[in-house]
Amino acid sequence: EDEDGGDNNINDAESSKSHSSSKASSLSKKKKQLDKNKKKKKDRPLYTLLPLNDQDTLYVEVRDQHVEKFGSFLQEQAKALKESHANFSNKDKDLTEIHMFVKQIPIFTQNLKSLTTHIHLAELIKHTTIQSEFRQRWQIERSIVESESCFDVIEDLIASQYNVWRVLRLLCLHSLTNGGIKTNKLDALKREVVQTYGYEFVFLLQNLESIGLLRKKDTLWDTASSSSFVTMRKHLQLIQADVDPLDPDDVSYVSSGFAPISARIIQTAMKGWSGKEEALKEIPGRGIDVVQKYPPEEYSTALKRTIGAPLGVWAKQFKMNDNRTTDIGDGTNSRKKKPVLLVYFIGGITYAEIAALRFMSKRNSFPFSIICCTTKIINGTSFLQSLA
């Protein structure tokens, strides 16, 4: 019995040893796999550089679309790509058709890769736009543009240490759209900004005042009815609340109802400033018509001339004197080319303005093809940071 018991103990020990060895081997394999996965993850770059330009045909179509249309458009593209592949796969093809399909495989692969990339980008954009913080910020900006007082909201944002650049953007927007901010209120807001975000913003606030983005308003009543922005908003119809972002008919779709002032100025110059003189007076700077001719016109002569004929009249004259045509896609050359309108922005332009100008240029009712030149692509934050 003792010998049998000893043999049993030895067998149990060997079995336990074998089980422990198997378990250790399994854990070792798992550890190696985890280390391998960690190494792959470590080697994987955090960011991937993605070129977005005219060589990507899908990007050309979606770059100026509203965010609400972006996702559904990509879904339609994915469905069309899938149906195109299914139509070939489900039918018997002769050698010629098979050869043609094989030649199109690289194009199909490239389109699929591009579509996958833009779907991932759409998901990232949607994740941002559905956040309550994004929607709240859009609503605050819209309220300020409509001349509503939002000081309480701005003060709450400062108290919660909200992004300082976005707070400053709201302050500047409030000042510009309301003809300034009452002295006591502006001083209090500046003090709160400095105490919350640091004394390094003292110089930025001074710079914002020196260039007129923050302005003191010494009036008895805090009203925006006399501000230059209200006049432009009314005469240039800057707000179009009923615009459909899925099927837009106005440049205001780029911000869900607010038209960029630069785009409205171009549209008004196209039709003429008759009835819009009040808005023209409120635009900073002076409107000058300079006629290109040889020898060049003297600048002093151009200053004496009043605003001339609308740009639309120039477009009609150009079309009458020009016989160039462009192919409209059906093999005929029946559509005349549009004359080119060069619009130059000194200081910078936003992507929203670019989208609005492209929208205008593509419409048949707009008589020009717009080429936009600028010194820089900017946004509100990058502009303020350049002044710091």
Image (cartoon, rainbow, N blue to C red):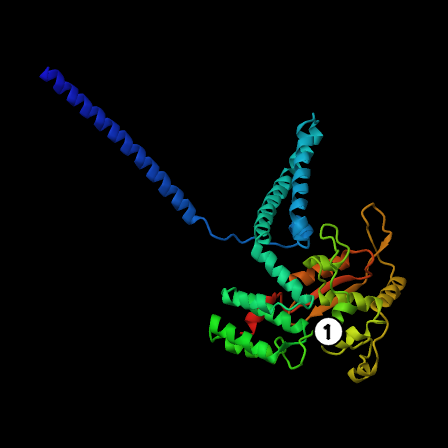
Q: Is residue 335 above or below residue 266?
A: above
- Please, which residue is most extreme toward the top here? 1
Residue at image position (88%, 64%) is: 316
Percent of width and height locating residue 139: 63, 60
- Asked if residue 381 can be seen in this view, the reply is no
Name the image quarter holding residue 105: top right
Percent of width and height locating residue 129: 60, 53
- Asked if residue 75 can be seen in this view, the reply is yes
Percent of width and height locating residue 357: 73, 61
Q: Nearer the viewer, residue 162 or 86?
A: 162
Q: Hey, what amino acid is under mark 1? A: Ser
- Please, which residue is most extreme toward the right here? 320
- Please, which residue is most extreme toward the left here? 2
Q: Is residue 100 left or right of residue 18?
A: right
- Please, which residue is most extreme toward the bottom here? 300
Circle count: 1
Q: Which residue is mark 1?
A: 225
Q: Is residue 362 above or below residue 166?
A: above
Q: Is residue 91 above or below residue 42?
A: above
Q: Is residue 283 left or right of residue 152?
A: right
Secondary element under disc 1, as helix, strand or loop, is loop
Name the image quarter holding residue 103: top right
Q: Residues within 10 Å of mark 1 (few under 14, many from 20)?
A: few
Residue at image position (46%, 51%) is: 45
Percent of width and height locating residue 130: 59, 51
Residue at image position (76%, 66%) is: 264
Name the image quarter holding residue 23: top left
Assign the N terminus to one quadrant of the image: top left
